């Protein structure tokens, strides 16, 4: 090619890169540059090993306390207790390790985009090489179907179009040119980007960036740098663990002081301190939380929502802001014919209305002037052309018959100067038809039958304002073969077609539900502001009076302002960059909001990772987005996000409920042991008995609460404040009252056994063990949220009844199986004493119900 015809900037680039545009690099020079600049590959992310993940499972305050209790048990010779506690620690660690072995995959997915072959021009010849061997200054040869292997600048092209949606979010292919357009600062039309797809045409380009220097490489760095915050549930459980430590430490100190005042043996005091430590820590809490979240994951998977991280299920429940893409999430991601305008008429009609003869002529031309192919199995070509073929077939036209009747003899491809495409068809020996489509202004200039050009242009602008993309069509009939410029004049204007990616009809009620639930939904798209506003209005994201969309260019200035009110008030952002998506997420996170972010492309990966809950599209999304996100929508529907948020809220309420249950049970154990110590009574519960109650009889009812269904409408109130603790001050008051009532009942049975039945302390110990276990089982019925005691979400939960039945069988086993009786040091109990156990276990229920009805706990 003649390099003098290139733009001056491109000519200087060849000089800067020391490359001949006619010959390219020599193999020797290419090798030198590969050694100097490195391979054309993205950096490898360091993935955490299994050993590292295993170690992380033990970094928990609760685990530290349990480990200390286990060590003390071994030192004191209570090896059975030590092994039991150690087993619980290992079970928790194993579950966590198994469920978190999916970290570090995002960078692997990014690198897989580069595992392709590429054609380069070296020493005047074409060479096909692995894309990793491309270096700066190489001349790339590209054509339709190629994945571009490196960032480059075009210096030769023929009708080149590239799908850059993975970087920009723009759904339509981008027409390339050799000139840089100053209005397109982010992605100039003469630039090509690694990882994007050539959809039409061919060309040559000089490589300017490889590996991490490319736009794709910069995004991979953003993914690596974006830090993932701890989820609300993780933070709340950590706070709860710290509070439990202080409670345990305080009670142990007081108990030791009182014990010394009573001149009790230090060894006995240490054993009781171990019992207190075990009683204070709800060993089953982590296991139950894990299973409750896993159950939520399973339920969501059945609704086409895949959650990859357990705690993300709960995060959804506290989400207050959702940044959503437009294409495919709020819309159907399928361009369709929406409106037609015929001839000189200023009227338009919808695509579902009756087609008359002029409209049929328009559709015939739209099929002939078309390079796409569409079938039930696969559609190939420009999305607008595919939409034309689909619409024509829906209206009864046979594509194959038309192409046979009107065989193509010539084509004038679309280009950015003429802005039209034209094809020449020979019908008979000396009869020809010219089919033309393109920009309305260009088609009207070449047409002779238009009387009101200005009005047609105004109509086109109004269609664009409604979010439609428009194409104009014309034809010409000739009785002899025309010259090469057969589309430049004497055309007959046929009409205009408007295309739309329709909004998903099911999105509107979901957005309304989000609004009622206090969730702010914000559209962030790479599409045109007008199109974004139109869709936002159609789905109900904006009202008819709201017409404000902030573009990426405006964002830079707005972020620089101290007052962020305008940014916070806007709900539609268009033409934004990956970094700007990160900035918007951080803006809301700094206000304390829990932020969700949807995405499907490589450009979305950093924002998906930075958000508290990243949501990827499973149907149209890239592998990078799916593996970076916490959640994947298999149907790409925004409605599924609403379903997931509701499920997340139910899960949190279930977790709050079973934590309240476990802690009230554990606190009752603490009070029983502590009060007995203050009264100088021999320890009424042994450490292993407490561990049995915590692990066996407490866990199963808690698990039933964790997987239950909440009957309240969880989407009728705002999201929880993420700073709010897991248990409110009212919950702690209730917890204290529950524990005190059960403690009083259990100690009452103890003293009744001692003084009423003349039992030994060891025999009275048995009464305390069984009464406390039974009282805690029955306590599950005190945690209902509805007014009725007999008909509520607890009594209607079949898992609760199953858990109680199982625990009763296990308690019977401790008495009837000799080995268990020996381990737990159980003495025979008389029948009359069983009545005492039954009364002591049931008595807390009416007392607590009375307290609840009197409103004392509010």
Image (spheres, rainbow, N blue to C red):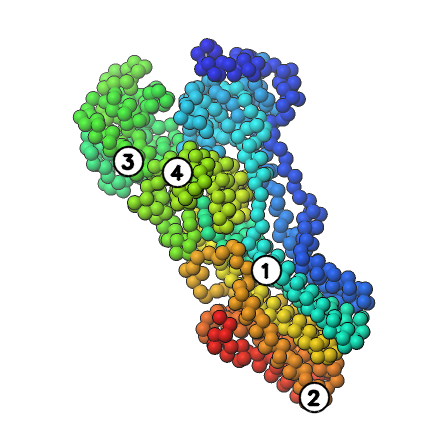
Check disc 4: other Cα within 10 Å, few if <14, some if 14-19, many if 20+: some
Q: Is residue 22 above or below residue 536?
A: above
Q: Earlier in the sequence, mark 3 or mark 1?
A: 1
Quadrant of residue 138 within the rendered picture: top right
- Residue at image mark 4: 550
Q: Earlier in the sequence, mark 2 or mark 4?
A: 4
Under circle 2, the secondary element is: helix
Q: Earlier in the sequence, mark 1 or mark 4?
A: 1
| Contact? badges 2 and 4 (CB < 8 Å) | no
Under circle 1, the secondary element is: helix
Could you tell me how far apart the alpha carbons at marks 4 and 3 are, in whole angstroms? 21 Å
Label annotation for residue 463: 3
Q: Is residue 587 visible?
A: yes
Q: Earlier in the sequence, mark 2 or mark 1?
A: 1
Circle count:
4
Q: Is residue 767 above or below residue 367?
A: below
Label annotation for residue 761: none
Q: Residue furthest left?
A: 451
Q: Is residue 559 above or below residue 724?
A: above
Comparing 427 with 707, the one in front is: 707
Could you tell me how far apart the alpha carbons at marks 3 and 1 are, in whole angstroms? 53 Å
Q: Residue at x 53, y 65 (%)?
A: 729
| Contact? badges 2 and 1 (CB < 8 Å) | no
Q: Nearer the viewer, mark 1 or mark 4?
A: 4
Q: Residue at x 24, y 31 (%)?
A: 458
Comparing 24 with 672, the one in front is: 672
């Amino acid at each position: 090619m003649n390099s003098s015809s290139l733009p001056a900037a491109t000519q200087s680039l060849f000089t800067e890169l020391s490359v001949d545009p006619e010959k390219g690099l020599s193999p020797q020079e290419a090798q030198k540059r590969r050694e100097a600049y490195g391979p054309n590959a993205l950096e490898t992310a360091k993935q955490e090993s299994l050993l590292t993940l295993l170690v992380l499972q033990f970094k928990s305050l609760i685990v530290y306390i349990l480990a200390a209790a286990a060590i003390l048990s071994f030192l004191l010779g209570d090896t059975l207790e030590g092994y039991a506690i150690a087993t619980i620690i290992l079970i928790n660690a194993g579950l966590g390790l198994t469920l978190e072995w999916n970290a570090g995959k995002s960078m692997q997915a990014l690198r897989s985009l580069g595992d392709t072959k590429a054609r380069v021009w070296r020493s005047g010849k074409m060479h096909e090489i692995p894309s990793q061997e491309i270096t700066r200054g190489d001349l790339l040869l590209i054509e339709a179907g190629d994945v571009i292997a490196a960032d480059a600048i075009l210096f030769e092209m023929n009708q080149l179009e590239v799908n850059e949606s993975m970087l920009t979010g723009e759904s339509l292919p981008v027409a390339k040119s050799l000139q840089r357009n100053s209005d397109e600062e982010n992605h100039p039309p003469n630039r090509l980007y690694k990882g994007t797809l050539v959809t039409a045409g061919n060309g040559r380009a000089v490589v300017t960036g490889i590996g991490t220097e490319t736009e794709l490489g910069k995004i991979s760095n953003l993914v690596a740098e974006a830090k993932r915050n701890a989820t609300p549930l993780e933070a709340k459980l950590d706070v709860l663990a710290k509070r439990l430590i202080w409670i345990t430490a305080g009670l142990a100190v007081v108990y030791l002081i009182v014990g010394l005042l009573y001149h009790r043996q230090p060894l006995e005091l240490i054993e009781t301190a171990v019992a207190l430590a075990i009683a204070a820590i709800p060993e089953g809490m982590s296991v139950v939380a894990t299973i409750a979240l896993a159950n939520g994951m399973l339920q969501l998977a059945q609704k086409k929502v895949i959650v990859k991280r357990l705690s993300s299920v709960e995060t959804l429940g506290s989400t207050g802001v959702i940044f959503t893409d437009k294409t495919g999430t709020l819309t159907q991601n399928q361009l369709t014919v929406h409106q037609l305008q015929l001839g000189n008429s200023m009227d338009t009609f919808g695509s579902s209305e009756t087609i008359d003869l002029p409209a049929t002529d328009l559709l015939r031309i739209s099929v002939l002037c078309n390079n796409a192919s569409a079938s039930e199995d696969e559609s190939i070509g420009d999305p607008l052309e595919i939409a034309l073929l689909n619409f024509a077939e829906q209206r009864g036209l046979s594509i194959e018959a038309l192409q046979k009747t009107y065989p193509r003899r010539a084509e004038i491809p679309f280009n950015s100067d003429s802005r039209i495409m034209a094809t020449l068809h020979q019908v008979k020996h000396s009869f020809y038809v010219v089919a033309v489509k393109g920009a309305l202004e260009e088609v009207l200039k070449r047409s002779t039958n238009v009387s009101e050009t200005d009005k047609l242009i105004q109509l086109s602008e109004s269609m664009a304002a409604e979010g439609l993309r428009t194409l104009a069509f014309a034809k010409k009939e000739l009785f002899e073969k025309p010259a090469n410029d057969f589309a430049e004049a004497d055309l007959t204007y046929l009409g205009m077609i408007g295309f739309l990616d329709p909004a998903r009809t099911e999105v509107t009620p979901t957005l309304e539900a989000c609004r009622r639930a206090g969730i702010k939904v914000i559209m962030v798209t790479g599409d045109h502001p007008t199109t974004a506003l139109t869709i936002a209005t159609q789905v109900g994201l904006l009202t008819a009076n709201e017409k404000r969309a902030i573009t990426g260019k405006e964002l830079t200035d707005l972020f620089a302002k101290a007052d962020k009110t305008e940014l916070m008030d806007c709900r539609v952002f268009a033409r934004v960059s990956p970094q700007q998506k990160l900035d918007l997420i951080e803006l809301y996170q700094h206000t304390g909001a829990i932020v969700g972010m949807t995405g499907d492309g490589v450009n979305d990966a950093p924002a998906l990772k930075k958000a508290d809950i990243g949501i990827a599209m499973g149907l149209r999304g890239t592998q990078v987005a799916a593996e970076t996100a916490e959640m994947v929508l298999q149907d790409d529907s925004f409605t599924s996000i609403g379903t997931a948020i509701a499920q997340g809220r139910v899960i949190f309420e279930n977790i709050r409920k079973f934590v309240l249950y476990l802690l009230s049970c554990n606190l009752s154990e603490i009070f029983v042991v502590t009060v007995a110590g203050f009264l100088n009574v021999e320890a009424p519960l042994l450490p292993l008995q407490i561990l049995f109650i915590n692990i066996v009889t407490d866990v199963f009812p808690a698990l039933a609460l964790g997987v239950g269904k909440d009957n309240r409408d969880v989407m009728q109130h705002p999201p929880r404040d993420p700073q709010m603790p897991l248990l409110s001050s009212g919950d702690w008051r209730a917890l204290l009252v529950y524990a005190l009532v059960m403690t009083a009942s259990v100690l009452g049975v103890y003293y009744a056994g001692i003084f009423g039945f003349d039992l030994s302390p060891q025999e009275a110990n048995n009464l305390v063990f069984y009464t406390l276990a039974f009282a805690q089982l029955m306590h599950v019925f005190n945690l209902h949220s509805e007014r009725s005691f007999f008909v509520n979400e607890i009594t209607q939960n079949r898992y609760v009844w199953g858990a109680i039945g199982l625990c009763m069988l296990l308690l019977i086993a401790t008495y009837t199986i000799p080995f268990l009786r020996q381990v737990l040091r159980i003495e025979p109990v008389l029948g009359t004493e069983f009545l005492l156990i039954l009364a002591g276990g049931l008595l807390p229920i009416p007392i607590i119900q009375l307290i609840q009805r009197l409103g004392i706990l509010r």
